[in-house]
Amino acid sequence: MSVLKNQLWGDPLVSAVRQEWSTSRKSHSCSIIPSHRVVLMTSDFEKSNPYVHELKKTAAYIAQPGKGILASDESNATTGKRLATVGLENTEENRQAWRELLYSAPGLGNYISGTIMFEETLFQSSRAGEQFVDILKKQGIVPGIKVDTGLQPIDGTDGETATQGLDGLADRCKRYYEQGARFAKWRAVLKVDSDKCPSSTAILENAHGLARYAQIAQANGLVPIVEPEVTLGPGDYSIERTAYVSEKVNSHVFRLLNEYNVILEGILLKPNMILPGLDVPTPSPEEVAKYTVRTMLRSVPAAVPGIHFLSGGMSEEEATLNLQALQAYGPTPWSLTFSYGRALQSSTLKIWSGKESSWKAAQERLVALAKANSEAQLGKYAGPHPSPGGARILQALRLGGAGK
Ligand code: 13P
């Protein structure tokens, strides 16, 4: 120790810093700063936020070990497209029945700590008249709400988009909080290719939108899920390219979150796993994990409680295997867990297909998928998967409307 100290003290840079420190100490009235006089400076936003403890508690609860988020916030239009795949009409009644099947699945709360809903669903009840928020709370699941209103093209870019929804957001957040929501989601989509995308225009626009949204959500008691999705798309761009781009995007997002004084212990991050373009063969879970963990370590502050990956088109089994592979790099400063939409719902919906007789089997599939991902989060998944094999679950990029 003393050898190390001598080496350090002898270092010219360390000596200069010590010299400066001792000069500045002498210029103050006290020569030693007693520990009780150390003032931890924090932003006025944090100091004046009445929800600050609740925000941190909610975020930590959702990020707890062995649990993840069920993303069921598809807009009515997108839900309609999903229902159509099993021959169901896009009626309010069918959307309500589908969400009731999900939220009332027995045992779901053992593996799921939060559920994201679309506005219609947040205010909806089961067919027997019990509010969905109450059904979820009984399961120990925190109700959440998607607050963005969809994507619009950015002029002069190669089909890149900006997320809409800041107008009137504070008032909407207040209503959602009153209804029982305790967290929110805003999805920014960043298109990636092998050279041009994402442009700096798209990165800055989306980082700004996410930061302003996060600040408004926190001011109104909702933990913001910050979702910068570098979206899996066509092309032969490499896994290194996605890693590089995602690192840049995350870094800009946290730079802007800092600019807006967003309280990092009271947010959750929802990024993509690092995957190459769709024309490249699917990488092994180990390869995905290596690049994904490196990207997060390089760009996500340790104060963030949870990183909840989206499934982004991965097959149900691929999403579980990749999540499990991430855990080999632990312990990490944040939990590495899931906020899956398609990877929890696809085979569940197929099994149900609107048939009362398949209701129970569909609920069992949902809970089995949630359990597999819970085990993967704990690094204990041993298979077999409830939905082995299977293709990627891709969707077209939607513009306009309130589309997830
Ligand atoms: P997927 O898991 O289907 O990508 O959906 C997660 C989500 O909420 C995207 O916004």
Image (tube, rainbow, N blue to C red):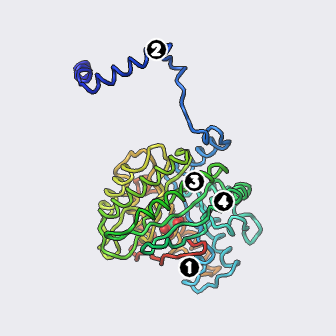
Q: Residues within 10 Å of mark 3 (few under 14, many from 20)?
A: many
Q: Amino acid at mark 1?
A: Arg
Where does label 3 land, which residue?
Answer: 214
Dividing the picture into quadrants, the one containing residue 211 is bottom right
Quick one: 81 or 226, which is closer to the camera? 226
Q: Is mark 4 within 8 Å of ligand 1?
A: no
Q: Which mark is residue 82?
A: 1
Measured in 3D between alpha carbons, the distance from the residue under mark 2 to the one under mark 1, in whole angstroms, is 66 Å
Task: Name the residue rendered at 46%, 59% in the picture.
Answer: 204
Judge left or right: residue 6 versus residue 35: left
**Residue 369 shows in this picture:** no
Of the image marks 2 and 3, the number of the one nearer the N terminus: 2
Of the image marks 3 and 4, the number of the one nearer the N terminus: 4
Q: Which mark is residue 32?
A: 2
Query: What element does badge 1 sit on?
Result: helix
Query: What element does badge 2 sit on?
Result: loop
Q: Residues within 10 Å of mark 1 (few under 14, many from 20)?
A: many
